[in-house]
Image (cartoon, grey):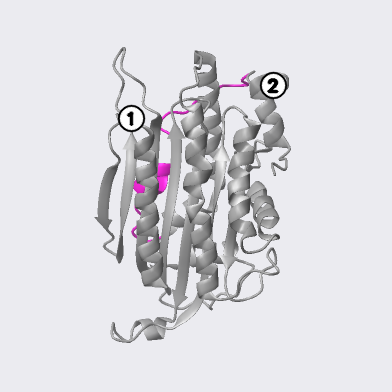
Amino acid sequence: MRVLMESWIRFLQEDIVQALEKLDPNAPKFQRDSWVRPEGGMGQSCVFAAPTASEGQKEFILEKAGVNISIVHGTLPPPAIKQMRADHTSMPLPEDAPGGLPFFAAGISLVIHPKNPHAPTCHANYRYFEITDPASASAGAEVAPKTLAWWFGGGSDLTPSYLYPSDATHFHQTHKSACDAFSPSFYPALKKWCDEYFYIPHRSESRGIGGIFFDDLHAGPHARLPDNPRTLDSIFVFVKSLGAAFVPAYIPIVEQRAKTPYTDEQRRWQLIRRGRYVEFNLVVDRGTKFGLMTPGARVESILMSLPETARWEYMSEMGADEETEEGKLIRVLKEPKEWV
């Protein structure tokens, strides 16, 4: 599975980056940064950052974007093990080992921040994690380590600044179709999980209008997915199907909204909403916390998700009036709705 996962995330990364580059042929290409982790493993960060525009220069569709993959291995120290146990209470995990627990992780993580306030931000992440037996891991490279626990996680979600119900329906329907090919029970469960996960408690609102989210998919029973696939291969096929849904779910939305005229006030609102995005990622998101606790954490890649520009206003009046376009978004963020 390690080899299969690495091959797939490399393919998916290139497929998504090419689709994003085709959106705006006149924009600079994504910077492809291959790196090696001294503690074990490697990765590639594909990052776009729009150059500072001079007066009269055409605006690029994307402002900041990153499509990153990592294939890493090593030993989880006690703080990371403690965080892992707190994050994965629904599945059996091995006992602590004095010297830490050997691990392998491979995944793709991406965040796209368009410049136009009418074009939504989008995030996706798909990952595979293994915990192996410390004794077998020290036996030598010629012996495959014994796997004590493994699981898949991931999902994709949409974060608009302005609400276009047709965009929300398209994004959700595309992911629902990918889920329905396996079970009609999957999409409702993953949609509900997404609404619960991407929630900002101190603001009493969601980060965006949701999508799908899942974690701890393994060979045992799953509390949220009673009919979940139970084998390594069948779960991998399911995860690949969800990953393949990203381009058709998101790219058409950006193509449609990127040329919509916008005002300075709409840009102001977009930056306020991006401030909320930052708050979730730095204060709430458990993936960010776990990543920063992992030895040899590549901080630049982890914080790639943050927008280039954000805004915080003291007691801002924007969004307070439910009859405004900003207020209509806030209403949905306070009370998530069913889009399909």
Is residue 137 found inside the magenta-colored segment of the image?
Answer: no
Q: Label 1: few (<14), some or many (≥20) within 10 Å?
A: some
Kind of residue indicated by mark 1: Ala
Q: Disc 2 or 1, which lies upstream in sequence?
A: 1
Can residue 187 be seen here? The reply is: yes
Between the residue at mark 2 and the residue at mark 1, the CA separation in whole angstroms equals: 32 Å
Question: Callout 1: helix, strand or loop?
Answer: loop
Quadrant where the N terminus lies?
Answer: bottom left
Q: Is residue 317 above or below residue 274?
A: above
Q: Position of residue 326 (x, y in %)?
A: 64, 23
Kind of residue indicated by mark 2: Ala
Circle number at residue 50: 1
Indicate left or right for 172 with 126 as reference: right
Q: Is residue 218 above or below residue 118?
A: below
| Bounds of the magenta segment | 294-316
Can residue 282 be seen here? The reply is: no
Task: Report the mark closest to the observer, 2 or 1.
Answer: 1
Total labels drawn: 2
What residue appears at the point 67 percent right and 35 percent down from the top-left corner? 333
Q: Is residue 152 above or below residue 23?
A: below
Whether pointer 2 and pointer 1 mark residues with C-beta atoms closer than 8 Å, the reply is no
Is residue 297 found inside the magenta-colored segment of the image?
Answer: yes
Q: Which residue is denoted by mark 2 in the rendering?
A: 320
Q: Is residue 167 above or below residue 248?
A: above
Q: Position of residue 23 (x, y in %)?
A: 39, 34
Question: Callout 2: helix, strand or loop?
Answer: loop
Q: Label 2: few (<14), some or many (≥20) within 10 Å?
A: some
Magenta stretch, main secondary structure, is: loop
